[in-house]
Image (cartoon, coloured by chain):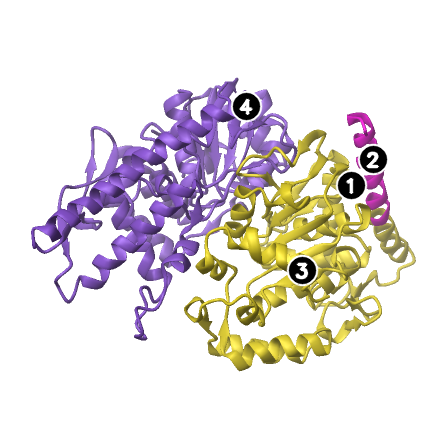
Chain colours: A yellow, B purple
Amino acid sequence: MATKRELAALRKAKATKTLDKLTSLAEKVITQAEKLDNPTVEIPIRALSNVAFNKKKHIIEMGSKTQSRTLFNVNMAKRFAQTFLVAKACKELLDAGKTTSIRDLYYMTKHSIGKTSENTFENQGESDPIIEDLEVTINTLREELHLFASNKGSMVGELTLVDAGDTIDARRQGSGGWAVPSIVEDDVIQFKKCDAKFVLLVEKDAVWRRLNEDKFWRKYKCIIIQSGGQPARGVRRLVRRMADELKLPLYVLVDNDPWGLYIYSVIKQGSINLAYESARMAVPKARFLGLSSYDRERYDLPDDSTIMLNNKDVARAKQMMKYPWFAERKWQRELKKMLDSKVKLEIEALSSKGITFISDEYLPRKLKEKDWLV
Amino acid sequence: MATKRELAALRKAKATKTLDKLTSLAEKVITQAEKLDNPTVEIPIRALSNVAFNKKKHIIEMGSKTQSRTLFNVNMAKRFAQTFLVAKACKELLDAGKTTSIRDLYYMTKHSIGKTSENTFENQGESDPIIEDLEVTINTLREELHLFASNKGSMVGELTLVDAGDTIDARRQGSGGWAVPSIVEDDVIQFKKCDAKFVLLVEKDAVWRRLNEDKFWRKYKCIIIQSGGQPARGVRRLVRRMADELKLPLYVLVDNDPWGLYIYSVIKQGSINLAYESARMAVPKARFLGLSSYDRERYDLPDDSTIMLNNKDVARAKQMMKYPWFAERKWQRELKKMLDSKVKLEIEALSSKGITFISDEYLPRKLKEKDWLV
């Protein structure tokens, strides 16, 4: 087991690596300035036009198109300066060994320019995209820049881990569980004794609590994580690390509606907006355990446990059917069945068959019959 | 320390008490029916008209007005039946020793009536108020009916507690912390070794993480809890129990805007909507640590760390000035100062003075100078 000193050394080594990237970005610009060239940064484009679905790797990837951001250009000068203001603040964080929120970073970098009424940043809507620019430009994750967004999610199960030097036995986390932090890189979180055979990620806190109360994770030797809707980066990165380092299969349990299926999709192949993160956040082998559009018949769920699809649901399902990553026949069938049946199903609908139906029947049968989609 | 068996016995004793209340409610109605009277339940009214601010206890209280809900009345028959459907489902939960979400309860109690197209409940919007009716009618908390809403919040600090039989040392919960569950009654959560001198509740997760990373709780011997905005019932009940059982003062740190001040107010004296819970959820001695409208001058915060009040902020502040629980001069001054200065301040604004300004200067000085409002 890594000692606190070893962890600190690891943290420092990782910080140094990121600092080197920041420094060489700055040095390149200084060199240009000394040569009296127009200082320029090449920033990869984060838009649908520069995104592609890699069928082989099964992830949504960012392409190689970039845009130049130059200092001596009326339209770009401010953003050029903002880029380096953010880089400077990240350098300070890394130097101090501190992390902070993207909201905090906005306040750290906001100030009025000289004696003018002009501010470096007018609002966080200006600083957030600059952070993403910086991430893609120097090929780093924001967590490596010591920045975090919101955290969400909790976890229990057959795993011991170390979090910031404290040993967390996820088998003994009571009813509340361990709150998943937003930065889960290996200089903060390290996996120790793992007795789990798989990871089950559920979209909903209330369902997770049902499974925890029933000690589902103990009986089926697994780790259960709830994401509170669309998973935060911390949860996505954590399950990815579990897939890579612990070789655990990941099962995803979401509502049977377009939004639930899309949560699975983002976990599996990443999203359009954050395509540059797919390589380190996506879990291409993630298995869709449910709720399937066919579960209503297969598990004999009563009609009154369903909810009618509304117009937004229908439009979203149709839109999703056109995405290349939903092109395979099994997904077209799932979405078509949902549209044909005109109804959606929440995970909680299983409770119409009894409080512990999900723990005692639904999940065990799903797993036994290998009734999932990949 | 209570053994698992003792905890189970306590849980059972509490369940029995609630079951008795449910049973006597049902028996009363059966007696009426046998006498051929119109079965009637007296339900305390949950509205502004039945709410009063108790200046002495410093909590918002529910009055004694009730409304009759009778079976043989076209307008009430459905809700009368719904009341007992919910009571029956809660009895099942208590009998089985299980807890569930209010969403789940909706699915448990929803079914079509006979061969009609009429459902017992059309949506959760119908079942939630019935739960609240039941709570006030038999004078119980929903947690005692084994129901939970959402959970939010995490905690670290100088306290050991037992959660569902697992010992949680809040001094060793890493960067994530212990996730506060939504049911924190003493048959689930029990306090053990406490070395804390106070509790600090912060509205914002990102600020909490700053304090945890800086190990503020270790240096100042306290417990830090983040509520993720308006605290969920679990967090409110937990800090109340800490105030009662551990005799710890509670400090609240929120944004300096009307919404932040109102979060403090709900923690302190309860809310209008849930006035019946104040007696068991409110912490009348809670101290408002900040951000005060005077902090900008007192802590020399730069002008560009402020945000202009918008129309909604102004209207809300003016509305709050009229509430009896904001009538004291100190609160009128706070709100007036906010309105006069025309700006609001987020806790993160402190970062404009440095990343660790909040841990190293702001909070220590606040506590040392006893610069808070009660």
Residues tagged by mark 4 and mark 2 found on one chain of the structure: no
Which segment is the magenta one? A1-21
Vertical placement of residue A333 versus B284, above or below: below
Q: Position of residue B99 (x, y in %)?
A: 44, 44
Q: Which residue is mark 2?
A: A10
- Find out whether the residues at labels 2 and 1 contact each other: C-beta distance under 8 Å: yes
* Chain on which label 3 sits: A
Disc 3 to disc 1, how far (Cα)?
26 Å
Disc 3 to disc 4, how far (Cα)?
42 Å
Residue placed furthest toward the right: A35
**Which of the two labelled residues, at mark 3 and mark 2, occupies the earlier sequence position?**
2
Left or right, B358 with reference to B296: right
Q: Which residue is mark 3?
A: A129
Q: Residue at x 39, y 54 (%)?
A: B105
Give the quadrant of residue A28: bottom right
Q: Position of residue B274 (x, y in %)?
A: 29, 45
| Type of amino acid at the residue the image marks with label 1 | Asp
Residue A6 highlighted magenta (yes or no): yes
| Mark 4 burial class by Cα count in 10 Å: few <14, some 14-19, many 20+ | some
* Chain on which label 4 sits: B
Instruction: Using the rendered image of the protein, determine whether residue A280 is visible from the camera's viewpoint.
Output: yes
Q: Which residue is mark 1?
A: A186
Main SS type for the magenta part? helix
